[in-house]
Image (cartoon, helix red, strand yellow):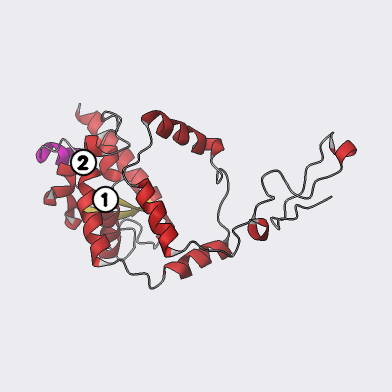
């Protein structure tokens, strides 16, 4: 067994041609990693960085190039496919973000760009194929509302009165579909701006088991009323 000399710790897989030419020192593509890279420990000067920035101004990838890049980086082609950060790496990322303050200038830029994140202006827009109910439930504002409901109920299931931090769900007393019809909501933007949709009093905390039981009872009641 021979390990790659770049320091990645990976084993070099034996190939048929290795008998003739010998086992290489590196895995293919690893020879320029870390200290072996010609730019290791070097940094671009401010002048070089500015030249690089000026050269890139106004240049954009074509639609075909963007599609190809997307295909080459999605699913199994992605370098991180099936991989997960270790606890040590997660801790390093957390420590690196502590004390990081976003400047007022950056905040204003982000605020300005938010209008390009909705509907047809969004780069991921596919003609409105995502159901509105699903889009609302996967929005950041919904997740915040859900957290506030849990906080209001002291992270306790209001049926069995047990504290199940990782197994809690927020239930709408007046259903989400009812509220969408009531306020005549047709788009995600309208939903985000609708105050009545985000009333914490309309939310109640249940554990997964009690929530499932409640919905089965509600569905039986609906069938009986038909």
The label nearer to you, 2 versus 1, is 2
Question: How far from the left and from the top, in percent, is residue 30?
Answer: 68, 49
Question: How far from the left and from the top, in percent, is residue 181?
Answer: 13, 36
Residue drawn 64% across the image and 54% down it: 33
* Magenta highlight on residue 172: yes
Residue drawn 41% across the image and 71% down it: 98
Give the quadrant of residue 132. Answer: top left
Q: Which residue is mark 1?
A: 142
Q: Is residue 7 visible?
A: yes
- Find the magenta span and give its range: 171-183
Residue drawn 44% across the image and 58% down it: 48
Residue 104 against residue 176 in the figure, above or below? below
| Crowd band around label 1 with a 10 angstrom C-alpha radius: few (<14), some (14–19), many (20+) | some
- Tell which of 219 and 96 is nearer to you: 96
- Tell which of 76 and 195 is nearer to you: 76
Q: Is residue 164 visible?
A: no
Left or right of residue 100, residue 204 in this image: left
Q: Which residue is mark 2?
A: 188
- Check the picture and name the quadrant holding the C terminus: top left
């Amino acid at each position: 067994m021979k390990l790659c000399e770049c320091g990645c710790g990976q084993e070099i897989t034996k190939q048929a041609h290795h008998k003739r030419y010998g086992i290489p020192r590196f895995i293919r593509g690893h020879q320029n990693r870390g200290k072996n890279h010609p730019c290791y420990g070097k940094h671009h000067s401010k002048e070089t960085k500015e030249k690089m920035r000026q050269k890139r101004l106004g240049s954009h990838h074509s639609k075909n190039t963007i599609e190809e890049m997307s295909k080459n980086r999605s699913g199994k082609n992605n370098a991180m496919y099936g991989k997960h950060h270790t606890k040590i790496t997660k801790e390093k990322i957390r420590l690196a973000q502590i004390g990081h303050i976003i400047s007022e200038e950056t905040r204003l830029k982000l605020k300005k760009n938010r209008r390009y994140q909705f509907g047809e202006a969004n780069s991921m827009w596919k003609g409105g194929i995502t159901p509105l109910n699903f889009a609302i439930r996967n929005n950041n504002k919904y997740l915040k509302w859900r957290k506030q409901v849990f906080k209001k109920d002291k992270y306790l299931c209001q049926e069995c009165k047990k504290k199940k931090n990782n197994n809690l769900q927020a239930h709408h007393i007046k259903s989400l579909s009812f509220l969408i019809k009531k306020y005549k909501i047709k788009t995600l933007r309208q939903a985000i701006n609708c105050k009545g949709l985000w009333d914490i009093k309309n939310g109640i905390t249940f554990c997964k088991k009690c929530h499932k039981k409640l919905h089965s009872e509600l569905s039986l009641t609906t069938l009986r009323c038909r």
